[in-house]
Image: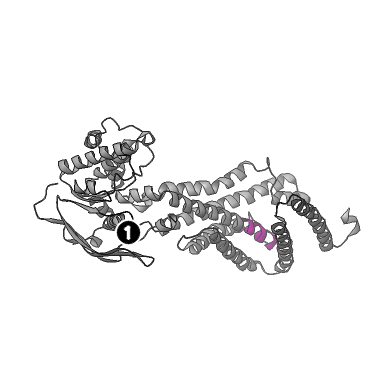
Amino acid sequence: MRRQNHHIFLSVEGLSYVVDGQTILSDITFEIEAGETVAVLGPSGSGKSTLIRTINRLDEPTSGSIKIEGEDYHAIPPRILRRRLGMVMQHPFLFPGTVAQNLCFGPLSHGENLTESEIRTLLAGVDLMGFEDRDISKLSGGEAQRVNLARTLANKPEALLLDEPTSALDEAAKNEVEATIKSVITNQKVTCLLVTHDPAQGGD
Amino acid sequence: MLGRWIDNQVWLGAAQAGVTMVAAMLVVWLTVRLKLRMEKDILVALVRGVGQIVLVGFLLTIIFTADLWIAIPVIAIMIVTASVMTIKRVSNIPNALRISLLGITAGSGLVIAVMTFLGVIEQDLTSIIPIGSMMVYGAMNTNALMMERFRSEVGSHVGQIEAGLALGASPEHVIQPYARRAVASAMTPNINGLRSLGIVWIPGAMAGMVLAGENPAYAGFYQFVVSGSIFVTAGITVIISIAMLRKQVFSKAEQLLLRSEAED
């Protein structure tokens, strides 16, 4: 989806997250324009994943506000919010079954289905043509993460929240997935928030 | 042989229990000889076992002289105790006591009431209380197994559950496979029990009736009534409990609440 320039898509203000007396996020404020890619760099344990999880509302922030296109995200039903902000986790966590079944999971959960052509297009986007009927147990780490990305894209999200998507991969698989993500961001002009501990990845 | 020497039934029972206790002491002696370090546990279990069951026996002799309605508070006490014992076996599940209490009450209460009303269980205390206790006990075990398994399934599939939520799926949808597995796993011993009935074992009710001189064919039918009722009770209990349980693990904002405990 194309958007006007300088249109703020995501606005985070004074976001804090405290659990069991431990402060994980403290007073985080930033904005992301529509179509923009922003990387958050930080070492392990600095709260990067929690930031992504609070924006996706898998965790509830202790204080602060999050707005999606100016609307308080509490006003958006969680399932709709999560479809709009597609999250790619560090580990793929694919569901048992085939690649196609995984891609259909999101659309099916809100009563839609993907056509064969849409499945092929999604797989082509992550460079996995012909993988529709492949059982997920037969995938390499890099392939599984690319299926994970395609599964998220199947919901046609307005933004991608990428939580260290290559940190669990070896060097070769990491390069594959990075290239795929870059191509998806460039081709689909999707708004993107990436958290990573890798300065090289953040700089790209 | 003991029966020839002792006329009084209670004293005869005490003598029989004494002989059994001597046999149990042989096992204790063996565990000491083999240095298994179990003798303390076995002795405590034996003393508790004989104490509790004899006490219940004396209590029942008093209860059985009371009005039929005393069955309601007696069964209610059994249900509350069973619910408390269930939650001792599961940890970190919000409202586990309420869920267990409602599940066991609905399951055993409904089956005991219907079976007694229809006359399948005879309308006297000597039938309602022992058979009711078997149903409550069965419901307790099945419910505890289901809750333990559900807790463990959720704990070991946090990633998949949250991946499903992150894709915009409903909590009911993402939890379904794990809830189904928990119920199936808890019901399996009941199903196996029904399947092996009479072939691998002759359960207590039938054995007792045969020992008391009842027609073995009638005892067989009656045993099925007891085992079938226990099965139905367990089924209703776990279905009601899982319906409540699956809602407890998510917040109103559809976030997985067991996540942090699961990752401990």
| Residue B132, magenta (yes or no) | yes
User: Residue B72: percent from the left, percent from the top?
Assistant: 60, 66
Between A97 and A9, the residue placed more toward the observer is A9
Asked which quadrant contains residue A94, the reply is top left
Between A124 and A110, the residue placed more toward the observer is A124
Asked which quadrant contains residue B110, the reply is bottom right
> Against B190, is A180 above or below?
above
Q: Chain of mark 1?
A: A
Left or right of A194 in this view: B38: right
Left or right of B85 in this view: B16: right
Q: Residues within 10 Å of mark 1 (few under 14, many from 20)?
A: some
Left or right of B106 in this view: B39: right
Look at 53% across and 49% down and name the residue there.
Answer: B186
Look at 39% across and 59% down and name the residue there.
Answer: B257
Visible in this render: residue B86? yes
| Residue A73, magenta (yes or no) | no
Magenta span of residues? B116-134
| Magenta span main SS | helix
Between B244 and A54, the residue placed more toward the observer is A54
Residue tagged 1: A59
Asked which quadrant contains residue B5, the reply is bottom right
User: Residue B116: percent from the left, percent from the top?
Assistant: 61, 58
> Against B69, is B159 above or below?
above
Residue type, numbered disc 1: Asp
User: Residue B168: percent from the left, percent from the top?
Assistant: 29, 50
Quadrant of image for the C terminus of chain A: top left
As drawn, the residue found furthest toward the right would be B5
Callout 1 secondary element: loop
